[in-house]
Structures are given as C-alpha cells and as structure tokens.
Amino acid sequence: MASTVYCMLLFPLLVMVVAFAGDLNKDFNITWGDGRANILNNGELLTLSLDKASGSGFQSKNEYLFGKIDMQLKLVPGNSAGTVTAYYLSSNGSSWDEIDYEFLGNLSGDPYILHTNVYTQGKGNREQQFYLWFDPTVDFHTYTIMWNPQRIIFSVDGTPVREFKNSEAIGVPYPKNQPMRIYSSLWNADDWATRGGRVKTDWTKAPFTASYRNFNAEACIWSSGASSCDQASSTSPNATSWLSQELDATGQERLKWVQKNYMIYNYCTDNNRFPQGLPPECNIS
Ligand SMILES: *[C@@H]1O[C@H](CO)[C@@H](O)[C@H](O)[C@H]1NC(C)=O
Ligand SMILES: *[C@@H]1O[C@H](CO)[C@@H](O)[C@H](O)[C@H]1NC(C)=O
Ligand SMILES: *[C@@H]1O[C@H](CO)[C@@H](O)[C@H](O)[C@H]1NC(C)=O
Ligand SMILES: *[C@@H]1O[C@H](CO)[C@@H](O)[C@H](O)[C@H]1NC(C)=O
C-alpha cells in the first residue's frame, strides 16, 4: 500500500516534468515534407531536408506553459544560402505568442545569421540578430529557450545571447497564458534570407539537410487545462527551480560580451524603423 502511494506521487513528477534526452519519437511528430523529415537511429537523430519541391518540418506532441528547453542542432553545411532553419515555440490563434530562433544560411565560408524574435499577443517586430562565434554547420551546438514568468533567455551552448524581460508593469504584454508547442522547419526563403535576398538558393546543391539531437525539456506540460508543474513544485521545489531563474553576474557578463561582439541587428536601436519612438521595453535595461 505504502509503495503504491509512493509511486503515484513520483510517477507524474519524473515523467511529466523532465523529458530525458532519448527517443525523439516520443516527443515529436513529423508534420510535413512527404518523407523529407526523418527520425533515425532509434530516435536519437532527427533530420529535416529541403529540395526544390518542398521543405519539411516537425512539432512537439506536448504543449508547454513555461520551460527550459534544450535542443542540439547542426545546420545545413556548405552552400546554404537562401535556406532558413526555424526552431521556435508558438501558441495558436490570432493573438498568438511565439519565441523564435531562425538560422539564415549563407554561401560556404560566409557566416550564418542567428535571428531571434519574440511575439506577444500576435505582435512581433522585436528582432535581434547575431553572428555566432563558431561554425554552426560542423558540429552540434545546444540552443536553449528558458521561458519562465519573469523572463525569456535565449542561450547558445550555455552562453546567453538575448534576454526578454516581463515588462507588463509598463504595459507590454508577456507570454504567460497561452501554452505553446515546439516547431521546426527547413524551407526556402531566398527572397530575403541571405544578404537581404540578393544571394539565391543554389538548387544544384540540394537536398539541404539540418540535424537535431539531445532534446531535453525541463518544462511545465499543459494538458487538459492543468500544468504538470503545479504538483511538481509543491512536492519537489528543486525540480522547478528554473521557474524563477535569472542571469547571475557571470551570465550578465557573457550576455554583454555577445551583444558587444556578435550582435548585428537590434530593433531597440533602430530609430529609423520606429519614428514614433522605440518600443517601451527597449527603455528598461
Ligand atoms: C502526433 O502523432 C500521433 C500519432 O499519429 C497523433 O495521435 C497525435 O495527435 C499527433 N500530435 C500532434 C500534436 O501532432
Ligand atoms: C493549436 O490548435 C491545434 C488544432 O486546433 C490544437 O491541436 C493544439 O493543441 C493548439 N495549441 C497549440 C499550442 O498548438
Ligand atoms: C552572409 O555573408 C555576408 C558576407 O560576409 C554577410 O554580409 C551576411 O550577413 C551573411 N549572412 C547572411 C544570412 O546573409
Ligand atoms: C535543492 O537545491 C538546494 C540549492 O541548490 C540544495 O542545497 C539542496 O540540496 C537541493 N535539495 C534536493 C532535495 O535536491
């Protein structure tokens, strides 16, 4: 009897809060691409590919309302100009929330752009773009979205590159009520992706392939109107410590280092684009 009670308490905690890196078949569905997307090696590896006829994509089975979500990606190698690999969280409907990574390809040897954006209640226009301090096509690197009620932190191999703080106090909507799924796709965007659309996709190099592995989510899974974290945080506060995570002094230094050396676009400094004044969240540090 005692052991039954024990199991009933622990089972949902372990199974629902932490999805251990493992079988990608458990967490994701291929959603489009007609055979161009594949889960391989017993679920250890997922690949998306793009050719002239179509791209491909997948989405998470679960919906999440907050999480610390890691995925390792190895981007399209060689001449990837014109291709975009999008990896993001999104909710539904006309006032959706979205947290975006997009990887804009380039000619061999020229740098990818890491493009980020945050939509709240259907409104985006919050782009920040970066070069990376490594070639993202040679090896897998970890791209993390840490999304809790106070802030969203984008990190690459553990180095924070962007923080979007909850600024509801000054009237900026924050994503905190709509559960999101993880989505990813590889598609042709040669009308804008590379050098603003001046470099086109070279279809003689198709198919283009991006790879994914080691998905890990410490996350609140949303199901039938309830969060897996409600129970977890009362039973084991440490399991959900990321729910109040913030950048420590080292993290803030790293963020400054990236923004100083690798940031190539920041909507918050684009005065031409916002003649009526920069968005309000730009005025808080
Ligand atoms: C994923 O695929 C399974 C099996 O085909 C299906 O039952 C489920 O509804 C799908 N979920 C999503 C979110 O696409
Ligand atoms: C979005 O809408 C689809 C289809 O109605 C539904 O299955 C899904 O759960 C909704 N939510 C998210 C976050 O995708
Ligand atoms: C591609 O390389 C060119 C030349 O270095 C650079 O200006 C551009 O920002 C790079 N990235 C993209 C996606 O265009
Ligand atoms: C919870 O976290 C604190 C601080 O990190 C640590 O000292 C403590 O041992 C942890 N407790 C458990 C049960 O893991």
Image: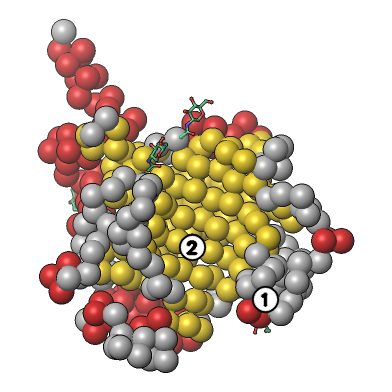
Please tell me how crowded label 1 is: few (under 14), some (14-19), or many (20+) other residues with Cα within 10 Å. Answer: some
Residue sticking out furthest to the top:
1
* Three-letter code for the amino acid on which mark 1 is drawn: Gly
Q: How many marks?
A: 2
Image side of residue 173 versus residue 255, left or right: left
Q: As displayed, is residue 243 above or below residue 109?
A: above
Q: Position of residue 63 (x, y in %)?
A: 36, 40
User: Which label sits on residue 101?
Assistant: 2
The residues tagged by marks 1 and 2 sit, at their Cα atoms, a distance apart of 19 Å
Image side of residue 114 versus residue 203, left or right: left
Mark closer to the observer (1, 2): 1
Element carrying mark 2: strand
Find residue 148 and report its image quarter. bottom left
Image side of residue 125 versus residue 222, left or right: right
User: Which label sits on residue 197?
Assistant: 1
Q: Position of residue 99 (x, y in %)?
A: 40, 59
Q: How is the image coloured?
A: secondary structure
Is residue 138 visible in the rendered image? The answer is no
Q: Position of residue 43 (x, y in %)?
A: 59, 34
* Three-letter code for the amino acid on which mark 2 is drawn: Tyr
